[in-house]
Image (cartoon, rainbow, N blue to C red):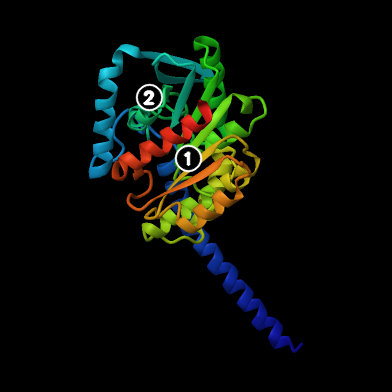
Amino acid sequence: MPWWLYILLGIIILAVLGGLGAMLYITIPIARRVYFEQLVKTSEEKWGRVCSAPDNEEQLAMWNAGIEWAEPHKAVMKEVEIENDGLKLYGEYYDFGSDKCAIILPGRCECLIYSYYFAEPYRRAGMNVLVIDSRCHGKSDGKYSTIGLGESEDIKAWIRYMEGEFGIRSFWLHGICIGSGGALLAAKSEDIAEKIGGIVLEGCFVDFRESFKQHMITDKRPVFPVLDLVMHNIRRYAGVDVMKIAPIKLVKHIHCPILFLFGRQDKFSIPPKSVKLFGACASVHKKLVWFDKGCHSHLRINNTEQYDNSIVEFVKEYEE
């Protein structure tokens, strides 16, 4: 090779490395800011017991409807708390006289008041209801969202507590968005699997990286390399490799009854991926219900009768 080609190649390599270095110099702080804004509780006020999106008409309507649901049931509500992983965790238990209990597992940014909104179909199905402040949400301790990993251990701790304190023999897990990941991880655990009567998942993603990517695309934000830098920050700060706990992998080990609720208008857990997730599920007692209206996590408010009836019928099929 002529000497001048070596020089030209060296110049090209230096230019590429320089460009890559400049890109990382700009995007690393952006990714860190995105991570701390979206997945870290950075103040006492953040992710408190308030409506997460009061400017969103449907979100506010869900919040208010949930409060209306809880009001007449105050007499059967008990405030409960546990400690797990060094964190104090808080919840409310609605005892309707059953030995079966549904645990509502909300998505990111949401507290237990938000979960009131999803309790009614389980009350109709003859079950008690436990709503919880997930770690680093509401009144519960914690700083980092662990995308379901630490949360699944909290769920298991809640199940052990409810079994010992209230004699609950069967638990149903209702996971919304990121709450689905915790539900699947808990149900997969051998020490808890036999206590799980079934699972209901709304808007479950195939993996958190895919969901976060869809958020960035919807918000018209540059995906590369910020997306993978955010995933790196999740590993660095929360100690979680999201691909190792991807729901698309977890459902291959789930054998209890499982109901998937998906929306055709969902921009974050998009329909083609949802079909793939359902197909990967190993349970022979699985069912998929599609909803024509409603964005991500807003299926019930747009299809209340269909949503509630789907859950009630599925629960009663396996609990009676």
Asked if residue 128 lies left or right of residue 66, the reply is right
- Name the residue tied to disc 1: 201
Q: Amino acid at mark 2?
A: Arg
Mark 1 or 2: in front is: 2
Q: Which residue is mark 2?
A: 123
Q: Nearer the viewer, residue 10 or 154?
A: 154
Residue drawn at 55 percent across, 11 percent down: 164
Instruction: State whether residue 5 is above or below residue 12.
Output: below
Badge 1, how many Cα within 10 Å: few under 14, some, many 20+?
A: many
Q: Is residue 183 left or right of residue 56?
A: right
Q: Quadrant of residue 131?
A: top left
Do the residues bearing badges 1 and 2 touch, measured as CB atoms within 8 Å? no
> Which residue occupies 32% across, 39% down?
305
Assign a secondary structure to mark 1.
strand
- Whichever of labels 1 and 2 marks the residue nearer the N terminus, that label is 2
Residue nearest the viewer, comparing 39 with 1: 39
